[in-house]
Amino acid sequence: MKQQQNPTTASNEANEANEAADSVRFWGVRGSIPSPGPHTAQVGGNTSCVEVNLAGERVIIDGGSGLRQLGTAHGALPLDAHLLFSHLHWDHIQGVPFCGPLYNPRSRVRMLGPADLHAALAKQMSGPTFPVSLEVMGARLSFEPIRPGATLRIGAITVRTAPLSHPGGAIGYRLEHAGRAVVYASDTEHPEHGLDAALLELAANADVLIYDAQYTPEEYPQRVGWGHSTWLKGCELAEAARARALVLFHHDPTRDDDAVAAIEATARARFAGARAAREGLVLTLDTRGEAKGSAGAAMTRGDAARDGVHL
């Protein structure tokens, strides 16, 4: 099993080496608002940010506060990446102003997402609430709109999209290359009956399905219409889609480490390939070996960062 360093302390050399492997790396796993503190230290408190290294391309999905962590780990190296935004709620863009490599004039970042992406990022970085404008960033930035349902290319990667059920709308992403697929479906609410047909198609036979599991089934009835789902619906979707691994994501900010671990254990009893997202978790796609650890054991943030998980 390959050894993976903790991404918050990785050197530039290790960072470059890890890019060679097809992998999914979690930098921020919370929803709504960052939730730092001793009771969330194992799972992590940063908001949504996932890095996918596939076919030699670096694709970052969402720019929550986890994007700052990514930038810090990247160090002084220029960043050459594609940054996909699911939508423009604050917890998915708030890390952009604090991502160091975006101020590096040698960085090149292609930003893709909703039509008003540039306007939203510029507004976030404006007075009186923020002293540095988007134009001050030294990186070469480009902005491209994505229509939910469209298909596009990032190098050799095929990116398919689907609309998600969320206030104001959101975009789900499927990244495919050489028979492998990673699906990101955060900030989505399941239908009252059955499964979302478009999302089911997007998730079909995915190697990794990252799914919004902010609420428990018991909490959900009081939160209908809020645009989020549950671990149980994630398991049902993963089963129906024949996904290999389900990663429960966008944890509620009130959920402490013990509560996340309990949800993970319950979900694994329903779908053996389920696990909770944790900052530092790395899923490696370059082997078909089994994941480290027993199907029912909770994986700590440190375990995941140190050992990686192979799919």
Image (cartoon, grey):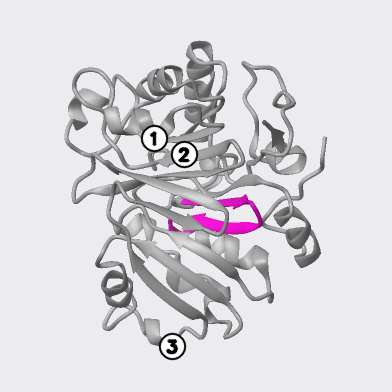
Q: Is residue 132 visible?
A: no
Vertical arrangement, residue 244 with respect to residue 33, above or below: above
Cα distance between the residues tagged 3 and 1: 37 Å
**Which amino acid is tagged 3?**
Val
Residue at the image point whose x is 56% and y is 24% from the top: 244
**Left or right: 185 with respect to 291?**
left
Side of 225 where 142 appears, left or right:
right
Q: Which residue is mark 1?
A: 202
- Of the pair 124 and 194, the residue shown nearer to us: 194
Instruction: Indicate which disc residue 183 carries.
Output: 2
Q: Main secondary structure of the magenta part?
A: strand
Which stretch did the figure color magenta?
49-65
Secondary structure at badge 3 equals helix
| Circle 3 residue | 136
Q: Where residue 200 sits in the image (x, y, percent)?
A: 35, 28
In space, the residues marked 1 and 2 are separated at their CA atoms by 7 Å
